[in-house]
Image (cartoon, helix red, strand yellow):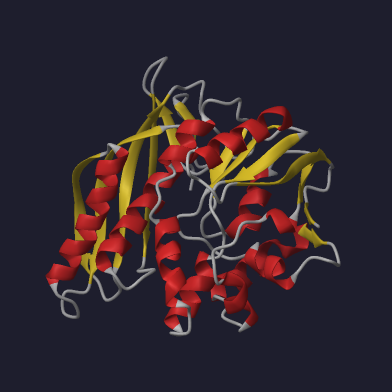
Amino acid sequence: MIIPADSNVLVGTGSKDDAGVYRISDTVALIQTLDFITPICDDPYDFGRIAACNSLSDVYAMGGKPVTAMNIVAFPTKKFSLDILAKILEGGQAVMNEAGVQLLGGHSVDDPEMKYGLSVTGIVHPEKILRNCSIREGDSIILTKPLGTGIVATAIKADIFDQEHVKEFISSMAALNKYSAEIMLKYNVNACTDVTGFGLAGHLIEMLQENNYSIEVDSEKIPLLPGVEDSADMGLIPGGLYRNRDYVSARCEFSKNVKQIYRDVIFDPQTSGGLLISLPEKEALHLLDELKSAGLKSSALLGKVVKCNEQKIYIS
């Protein structure tokens, strides 16, 4: 399909960025995105919170501020009470309130599989858009949330996950990237994306598009949710992890000493994951300190961008 060109489209379908961006004036551009997910937990209110956070995240990753949203709902009315849907929407609204986003409406369908998310509009200055592929040689790479949501969700479905860790699983996914984004924008960030369904490796690969760089990752620096390693050791691996591995593993090279958990979790599909930030090394430690001081304790400096035409991820 051929999409007509428009000079006001600053980020469109020709890239693998997190959202589309359309210029409406010299100082304002619209960021537009949508996302919806199936339930990742049992509690409908928490599901609503997580789905809303997941949908809003793309705007933060582009360096923007979300301003309006519309609900996207698929709900099996013959299977579940509408009270459950009310709780889902209540959870989503709580997150929108926290983000300062105005709900304008939405659309629902009766569907055999429950789904919820948002269509989001944000704003950004046309000259301050953050792309996912504008990394620079020597940049440090920071991740703001721990990994392992796909593995944990699989363990919970198998009913063998430590219930003491469930709250941390929910808390991580229901945490807005608003706060890390606000801190990030104080620094000279070169590139940003959020870690979602393609996993850490997939999103690092996206950062390499159109660049003659590679990224070196220190596996021991990768933050993990509690219980992830034990669950992975029991073979509780989601199907999406295998698909991600099949898709990008040819561009990932592991050192022999890398533990199995990191060989797995780097491909784990995330829901409402953290921001993946690329910025000059001299500023990265200051950003990391400020993130941790703000309560984002799982933030970690994973590695760096190096000059290399192979466009690979090297994990040691």
Q: How many numbered dots are placed on residues in this image?
A: 0
141 above or below 112? above
Residue for point 56% across, 51% down: 298
Residue for point 21% across, 74% down: 76
60 above or below 230? above
Q: What residue occupies the far top of the structure in this picture? A: 26
Residue for point 76% across, 40% down: 305
Q: Position of residue 9 (x, y in %)?
A: 46, 30
In what quadrant of the picture does the C terminus appear?
Answer: bottom right
Q: Nearer the viewer, residue 131 or 81?
A: 81
Can the viewer see residue 44? yes
Say left or right for 75 vs 154.
left
Can the viewer see residue 69? no
203 above or below 165? above
Residue for point 32% across, 73% down: 42
Q: Position of residue 94 (x, y in %)?
A: 24, 50
Tell me where residue 291 sits by quadrant.
Answer: top right
Say left or right for 114 vs 177.
left
Say left or right for 194 vs 44.
right
Q: Nearer the viewer, residue 257 or 194?
A: 257
Q: What residue occupies the far left of the structure in this picture? A: 82
Q: Position of residue 18 (x, y in %)?
A: 50, 44
Tell me where residue 133 sits by quadrant.
Answer: top right
Q: Position of residue 301 (x, y in %)?
A: 67, 45
